[in-house]
Amino acid sequence: MTADPPPPGPAVPGPATPAGSRPVSAPRDILGLLPPAAGGPAFDAHRPPPAELVADCVHCGFCLPTCPTYVLWGEEMDSPRGRIHLMRQGLEGEPLTESMVGHFDACLGCMACVTACPSGVRYDTLIENTRQQVERRHDRPARERALRAAIFALFPYPKRLRMLRGPLRAYQASGLRRLVARTGLLPRLAPTLATLESLAPRLTRAPKPPERVPAYGPRRAVVGMLTGCVQSAFFPGVNAATARVLAAEGCEVVINPGRQGCCGALSVHNGREAEAQAFARNLIDAFADTGIDYFVVNAAGCGSSLKDYGELLRDDPRYASRAAAFAARVRDLSEILVELGPVARRHPLPVSVAYHDACHLGHAQGVRTQPRELLRAIPELELREIADPELCCGSAGVWNVLNPEPAARLGERKARDVLGTGAQLLVTANPGCLMQIAAAIPRLGGSTEPRPAGSGGIALAHTAQVLDASIRRLSVDRLLS
Ligand code: SF4
Ligand code: SF4
């Protein structure tokens, strides 16, 4: 038996962009003919999506216009309300069909629906639990299994990612990249590889981070710092800037680079519970007995999952209380800087900045005012807002690798809004967003290379790099190049 569809909510805008193809992993099951992916009911007894949270949804539809998949395809089952309806079906004993899995997989986990929902529906908990069930109970096609296995054997391992730096730098320096782009063949022959290739930032030198960075002047706090996987391999300059800013603001920074690894964010956001728990335990151990007051994160996706360690390890008798205590110390870089208050002098930076709210900072952590407050405090910096700020850029962890075509369209939509500000510099606090928007800008005829203002060019930087430039009195040209 199939449960009734949700009652119609108020009229909501339809797709804001022409409907395109849905991801390959999300086949439509209009006639209900696709077979169940696994026998028996959709969910087992280990952390199913809680029925009481499902029941909180009153089907009002206020979340629909903020949902990127609904905006793309205009289909009810690709909206938060539709997915919650499918969860209810699963709780009522319906099997986990290919179609259901496709709709759950297509969710970016951007959490725009959580902030938009007037009834306070905890869609974050619902989709996280649902994804774990899908990963445990659904047999994916062999090709998709292989792709996911490759992704999760690479991305959460900073050392493996760093091994890619050499070949990637050689590829970028050889001019082969331009040649490959000119042929236009790669996206047609290997879309996933083409996506990875287009996302890779231009690599610079990556010196090994120190064990500790002393506070400049009187010490106000001891903070641990996450170096991250993608951040440490592809954006080492962001980590270096983060450590310098913290030190300038009176923090002793404990980095411990040999001991820390992945925080587990990518795993937890993709339903890989056991793997995420193992990464979390390792990180907690790496910073045990270091005497840190706070643990600072400069990547939005990592910060939101670190703040949830208590929940992730709640059933582990050895780690439950340590995980909760660790999570309570986690701060985004902008949060800790505002909390402590500035002591380092800000020097003028005459530049116009468009600030992009990374979903896992704005929606998942509610951190919106702090980065803006820090940027506005820089003399001569002009802050501009981007249209439709709540809408995801399409990066969403590895969603853009698994779903290259719709991710590219979301990226272009965001890039268009970014370029529409006419700002010289795009600033955000997540490596995934930086790569995603940087890859989309040239497809619109824009450039991330230095260009005169107003000529379709925009440089990109992390919040930490802007603060660092202001504190160290660097010229604006250094930021824009
Ligand atoms: S998390 Fe994002 S993509 Fe998923 S249902 Fe909510 S708004 Fe849509
Ligand atoms: S999730 Fe919230 S906003 Fe969306 S339909 Fe349900 S109650 Fe309404």
Image: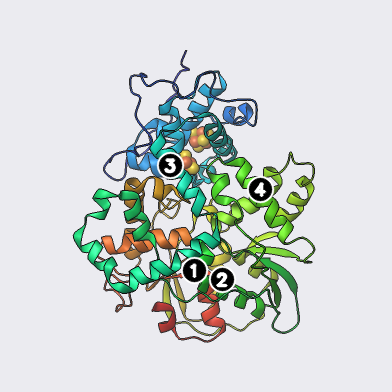
Instruction: Return the disc, 1 or 3, that comes first in the chain's sequence.
Output: 3
Q: Amino acid at mark 1?
A: Phe
What's the mark number on residue 239? 2
- According to the image, label 1 marks what residue? 235
What's the mark number on residue 278? 4
Q: Secondary structure at mark 4?
A: helix
The residue mark sitting in front, 2 or 4, is 4
Q: Amino acid at mark 4?
A: Ala
Asked which quadrant contains residue 51, the reply is: top right
In which quadrant will I find the C terminus? bottom left
| Residue 337 x, y percent position in the rendering | 64, 70
CB atoms at circles 4 and 1 under 8 Å apart?
no
Q: CA distance from mark 3 to mark 2?
A: 32 Å
Q: Residues within 10 Å of mark 2 (few under 14, many from 20)?
A: many
Vertical comparison of 216 with 89: above or below = below
What's the mark number on residue 368? none
Q: Residues within 10 Å of mark 1 (few under 14, many from 20)?
A: many
Vertical comparison of 27 with 341: above or below = above
Instruction: Return the disc, 4 or 1, that comes first in the chain's sequence.
Output: 1
| Residue 259 x, y percent position in the rendering | 67, 63
